Image (spheres, grey):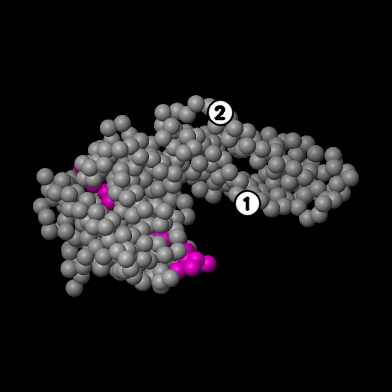
Amino acid sequence: MQQDLTPRDILTGLVSFPTVSRDTNLPLVDWVEAYLDDFGIHSKRIMSPCGEKAHLYAQVGPNVDGGVILSGHTDVVPVDGQAWSTDPWTLTERDGKLFGRGACDMKGFDALALHAMARASKRDLKRPLQLALSFDEEVGCAAVIDLVETMRGDLPKANEVLVGEPTMMKVVSGHKGGLGYRVHVRGFEVHSSLLPYGVSAIMQAAKLIDWANQKNAENAARAPSELAAPFHPPFTTLHVGTIEGGTAHNITAKDCRFFIEFRFVPGESPEDWATAFEARAAELTAEMQAIHPDTGIDLVRGFALPALTPETDGAAETLARRLTGDNGSHVVSYGTEGSQFQTRGYSTVICGPGDIAQAHQPDEFISLDQLAAGEAFMDKLLDQLCG
Ligand SMILES: [Zn+2]
């Protein structure tokens, strides 16, 4: 019954599951499993620790090294508070566009990948086509590590990974990495007239935040590396987006909490930035504890995503260029799961239908043209795998 589904039909099915990252994706995974099963394709799931979500992976073709992985995520961002003119969970066509949450980011690609797997099952592949569908991409790209590690152990090693985040089918070979911390500065309360005997959590937090300002200034002043040059801006940035603390103008603040994120360029690692930041926090903690031992700075890492580094003569870039005809060099400013594959030894690029400008927006859409371009891309990919 599923045999004749078009990519658009598959997309209609995928969009109908409200797979917001905080919620289950299991009904979608059930659907995908059944779809693949109809073509005799055996898929496997990897359950989340909470048991309410699953990754899914599958392979079509000979059980040999040198295949291609199509990588997508199944989760979407919420629609809360957004003004949608259509039901976000019902794929709706208007003016050559298909509207729905995830239509662009990135169930459009997922649908194309599933369709390609089905078609591949009827072809004589010389190299395997592998599918990797993850959960929790939108909340840090960390869950996928389990999927990558499992596929690496369970399947023959693929030669190229194509991550189908929306790039308008351009071949994107680099993105910045990300690192985030939840920071809790714990001070000691005294009347502000007795300032030297207390520890103001706010004023200590300000020192840590000013360290970030200094790093931004240093980074901006330095000549960009070759890897950093294509980015806007061509350097690592540190940013504090939220802060709260204190109880009254005349009490040294007992608590101050803020969130800091690092967006770092390829060639720099999250570990190096983490080490530098934690060292500055440790210096300040020593200062604070010299005044009162119960004070300190608690750091909780929120996320850590490596940068995607452009590869020299990378296999994935070469393949994607051949399939799209796009010979330009592109980097993007958003993070993807691609770097989790790349740092585990896979040649990786980002290439998928739709415009990132549509992602996460109300009335998110993918154009019929882009869906067709994605289908043509998959057709050529299957020809390559047969050749
Ligand atoms: Zn995405």
| Magenta stretch contains residue 76 | yes
Amino acid type shown at disc 2: Ala
Label 2 packing within 10 angstroms: few (<14), some (14-19), many (20+): few
Q: Amino acid at mark 1?
A: Thr
Rendered residue at 15%/46% (across/down): 384
Q: Position of residue 21 (x, y in %)?
A: 45, 61
- Return the x and y of residue 44 as percentages of the image width and height: 29, 59
Q: Residue at x 19, y 49 (%)?
A: 381
- 13 to 169, vertically: above or below: below
The numbered dot on residue 242 is 1
Measured as percent of width and height from the top left, residue 362 is found at: 45, 64
The count of marks equals 2
- On the question of residue 150 being in view, the answer is no
Res. 262 image quadrant: top right
Query: In the image, is 214 to the left or to the right of 293?
Result: left
In the image, the segment drawn in magenta is: 66-84
Asked if the residue at label 1 sits under 8 Å from ligand 1, the reply is no
Q: Residue at x 50, y 41 (%)?
A: 263
